[in-house]
Image: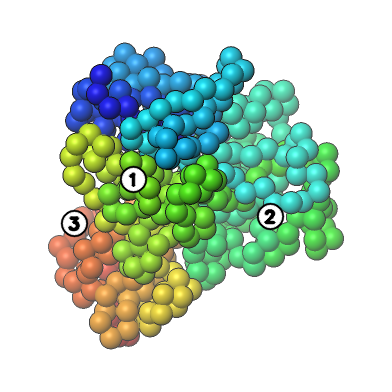
C-alpha cells in the first residue's frame, strides 16, 4: 500500500476527489468517512423525488459504498464521523456511530469535504415535527414518509431561493396549496429585485401564494405565524433558508477560514496546512469577475474543485481558476438563471456598469412555441466588459445563461458577444439570440 489519503465527507466533493485520485494512483490507500447512511447522492434531485418524478430514493445514489470498494478500491466507511483533526500528528479522531466507539485514524493526505449546514433561524417552534429541512437524503426520507402518511394540503415553504422554489413546485404538483414566505422584500435574493419580481409574478400565476417582507414569528402544529400578524395554515413546513459552510471541524484544527467561515484554499485546493486539502460547499471559491473570495455552495463547483484536488493528490498538477456564479432553476413553466455579478454585487466590487435589459422570445416570434424571455445584462461602463446576466423566461430560456457564462469566463466585452457566431434557426431562437439583443442594448449605453 502507498500513502493513506483520508476523505472526510462522502458526497459530491469527497467522492469525486477520492475517485479522481484513484484514477491516477492505483497504490493510494483511500479511506472515505461519511457520518450519514449514504454516499455519492444527488441532493439536487430531492425536489424531483418528492414530486414523484424519481421513483425511489436509491435512484439518487450514483454509486453505493460497495461499488466504491469493488470498482475503485476506496474504503468507504458509513456512519463514521470525524470529530477532530490533529494536523501535527496527522490523525483524525473518528466516532463510529455503528459500533459506538471512537478510534484514531492516521493519514498522510487529507481532504476536507464536509459540505454545508442548513441555516435554521432561531424561531419558536422551528424544531417541531411538521417543520422539515431539505439538505440530504435523510431529510428526503422524512419528507417521503410524511407524504406517505398523509398528503399535505397546506404547505408553507420558508425561503424563496432556488431550493424553496423547487420544493414549492414539488408540492404544488402533489396538489397542495403552497405558500412561499421570505423575510426579504423580494423573492430570489440572488437576482436583482426587478428580475425577482418577474419570478414572483410567475409564482402567483402558477398558483403559489407569495409573502415577501414578512419573517416568520413562530411555528405551531398546523400553522405559521408571520411577523406581519398573518397566520397561515400549514400541515407541513419546508425550510429553504440557505446554508453556511460546514467548516467547524477544519477551523477547530487551526486551518484558515475566510469568507462566511468557509475554508480558505489556493488554486490547487490546498488549505493553509500542509497535506490538508478542501473542496465543495465547505470551501471558498475565487470569483473571476469580482476577483474576490466567495462562497458558492453548488454541486457544479463542488465537483470541479474536487476533481482538481483529486488530480493533485493522485500525483498530477491541476488548478481551479474560479467561478462566475452560474445557476439555473425552474418553477413549473418558468425558468430562472443568473451568472456573474448582479447590480449590488457589481457596486460592492466597485465596478461602474450599464444595464441592457430586453424582452424577447425563446424562438422565432411567429412560431406557436415561442415563449417569453427577459434578459438583463450588466457591462462595465467604458470598457464594455460583460459583468453578469440574469434571465427569466419560459421553456428554452434557462440554459441560455451558459453562453454568457462562457463569455464571462473568457473576459468578453458586450461587443464581442454581439459578434459571436451563435447558431440560429426559427425553432431554436430568433435571428438575434436574446442574450445578444441584451448585449446590444448594453453596448448602446456604454
Ligand atoms: C435540495 C437541494 C437542491 C440542490 N440543487 C442543486 C442544483 O440544481 N444545482 C447545483 O449545482 N447544486 C444544487 N444543490 C447543491 C449541491 O447539492 C451541493 O452544492 C453539493 O452537494 C455539495 O457537495 P459537497 O460534497 O461539498 O457537500 P455535501 O453534499 O453537503 O456533502 C458533505 C458530506 O459530508 C458529510 N460530513 C459532514 N461532516 C462530516 C464529518 N465530520 N465526518 C464525516 N462526514 C461528514 C455529510 O454527511 C455529507 O454527506 C442542491 C442542494 C440541495 C440541498
Q: Residue at x 77, y 51 (%)?
A: 123
Q: Residues within 10 Å of mark 2 (few under 14, many from 20)?
A: many
Where is residue 411, by image quadrant? bottom left
Determine the CA span between mark 1 and mark 3.
48 Å
Q: Residues within 10 Å of mark 1 (few under 14, many from 20)?
A: few
Q: Which residue is mark 3?
A: 423
Residue 181 shows which numbered tag?
2
Residue 233 image position (x, y, % from top left): 80, 45
Can residue 421 be seen here? The reply is yes
* Label 2 secondary element: strand
Q: Residue at x 74, y 51 (%)?
A: 122
Q: Residue at x 19, y 60 (%)?
A: 422
Residue 274 shows which numbered tag?
1
- 347 shown above or below 313: below
N-terminal of the pair, mark 1 or mark 2, is: 2
- 413 shown above or below 153: below
* Label 1 secondary element: loop
Amino acid at each position: 500500500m502507498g500513502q493513506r489519503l483520508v476523505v472526510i465527507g462522502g458526497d459530491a466533493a469527497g467522492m469525486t476527489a477520492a475517485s479522481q485520485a484513484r484514477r491516477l494512483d492505483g497504490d493510494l490507500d483511500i479511506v472515505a468517512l461519511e457520518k450519514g447512511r449514504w454516499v455519492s447522492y444527488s441532493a439536487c434531485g430531492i425536489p424531483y423525488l418528492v414530486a414523484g418524478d424519481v421513483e425511489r430514493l436509491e435512484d439518487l445514489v450514483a454509486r453505493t459504498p460497495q461499488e466504491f470498494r469493488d470498482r475503485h478500491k476506496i474504503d468507504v466507511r458509513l456512519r463514521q464521523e470525524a470529530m477532530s483533526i490533529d494536523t501535527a500528528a496527522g490523525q483524525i479522531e473518528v466516532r463510529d456511530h455503528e459500533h459506538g466507539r471512537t478510534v484514531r485514524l492516521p493519514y498522510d493526505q487529507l481532504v476536507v469535504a464536509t459540505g454545508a449546514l442548513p441555516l435554521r433561524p432561531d424561531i419558536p417552534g422551528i424544531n417541531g415535527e411538521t417543520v422539515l429541512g431539505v439538505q440530504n437524503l435523510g431529510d428526503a426520507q422524512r419528507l417521503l414518509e410524511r407524504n406517505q402518511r398523509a398528503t399535505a394540503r397546506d404547505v408553507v415553504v420558508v425561503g424563496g431561493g432556488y431550493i424553496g422554489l423547487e420544493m414549492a413546485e414539488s408540492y404544488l404538483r402533489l396538489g397542495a396549496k403552497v405558500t412561499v414566505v421570505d423575510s426579504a422584500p423580494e423573492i430570489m435574493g440572488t437576482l436583482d429585485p426587478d428580475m425577482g419580481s418577474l419570478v414572483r409574478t410567475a409564482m402567483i400565476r402558477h398558483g403559489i401564494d407569495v409573502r415577501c417582507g414578512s419573517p416568520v414569528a413562530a411555528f405551531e402544529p398546523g400553522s405559521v405565524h408571520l411577523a406581519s400578524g398573518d397566520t397561515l395554515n400549514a400541515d407541513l413546513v419546508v425550510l429553504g433558508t440557505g446554508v453556511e459552510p460546514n467548516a467547524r471541524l477544519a477551523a477547530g484544527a487551526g486551518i484558515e477560514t475566510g469568507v462566511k467561515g468557509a475554508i480558505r484554499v489556493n488554486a490547487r485546493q490546498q488549505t493553509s496546512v500542509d497535506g490538508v486539502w478542501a473542496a465543495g460547499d465547505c470551501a471558498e471559491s475565487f470569483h473571476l469577475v469580482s476577483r474576490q473570495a466567495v462562497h458558492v455552495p453548488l454541486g457544479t463547483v463542488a465537483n470541479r474543485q474536487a476533481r482538481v484536488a483529486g488530480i493533485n493528490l493522485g500525483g498530477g498538477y491541476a488548478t481551479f481558476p474560479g467561478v462566475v456564479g452560474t445557476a439555473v432553476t425552474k418553477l413549473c413553466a418558468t425558468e430562472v438563471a443568473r451568472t456573474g455579478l448582479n447590480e449590488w454585487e457589481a457596486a460592492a466590487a466597485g465596478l461602474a456598469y450599464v444595464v441592457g435589459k430586453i424582452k424577447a422570445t425563446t424562438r422565432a416570434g411567429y412560431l406557436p412555441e415561442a415563449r417569453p424571455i427577459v434578459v438583463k445584462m450588466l457591462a462595465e461602463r467604458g470598457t464594455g466588459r460583460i459583468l453578469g446576466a440574469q434571465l427569466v423566461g419560459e421553456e428554452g430560456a434557462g440554459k441560455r445563461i451558459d453562453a454568457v457564462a462562457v463569455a464571462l469566463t473568457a473576459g468578453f466585452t458586450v461587443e464581442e458577444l454581439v459578434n459571436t457566431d451563435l447558431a440560429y434557426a426559427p425553432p431554436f431562437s430568433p435571428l438575434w439570440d436574446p442574450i445578444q439583443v441584451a448585449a446590444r442594448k448594453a453596448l448602446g449605453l456604454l
